[in-house]
Amino acid sequence: MKQVHRWHRAVAAALLTLAAAAGPVAAQTPAKPTAAVKILLENDKVVAGETTWAPGTENSMSARPPRVIRALAGGTLTVIYADGRTEQRVFETGGVYYFDRDAAPNRLKNEGATEVKVYFVFMK
């Protein structure tokens, strides 16, 4: 009987040691909702398509090439830079915009209540 008791204590001690080593179980962070991108044309000179930001969505962090944007459904997007800086970018429905190559990686997030949709042409 004493051997069984020792065996239980050994198993319990091993399980406690493993649990302590593993630490608390971290909750999985849900994936961030992403903007929908639809590529309409791609060749050796340009990439053309549409990006739609539903409320609360964002695109991936990157430094984008020179581009022309036409706002199909305007709104305000928050530009979030890799270093944490932010700025607001306003797109008026029907407006056409030109942006030089991004100097720093960033992502755009729709923090508003309505969808923002743009047509883009990226120069390669």
Image (cartoon, grey):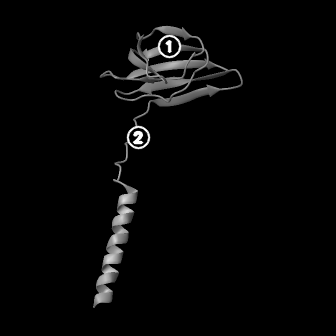
Task: Tell me the residue that label 2 is attached to.
Answer: 31
Tell me if mark 1 has few (under 14), some (14-19) or many (20+) residues whose alpha carbon lies within 10 angstroms of its own: many
Residue sitting nearer the eye, 57 or 13: 13
39 sits left or right of 55 in the view: right
Tell me residue 75's x, y (percent): 37, 15
Tell me residue 51's x, y (percent): 48, 25
Which one is earlier in the sequence, the residue at label 1 or at label 2?
2
Outermost right residue: 44
The dot on residue 70 is 1
Tell me residue 114's x, y (percent): 32, 22
Residue sitting nearer the eye, 111 or 47: 111
Q: In the rendered view, tell whether residue 61 sits above or below residue 12.
A: above
Q: Secondary structure at mark 1?
A: strand
Residue sitting nearer the eye, 24 or 58: 24
Q: Residue at x 39, y 64 (%)?
A: 18
Cα separation, mark 1 vs mark 2, equals 29 Å
Question: Across the whole image, how many numbered discs are drawn on residues?
Answer: 2
The dot on residue 53 is none
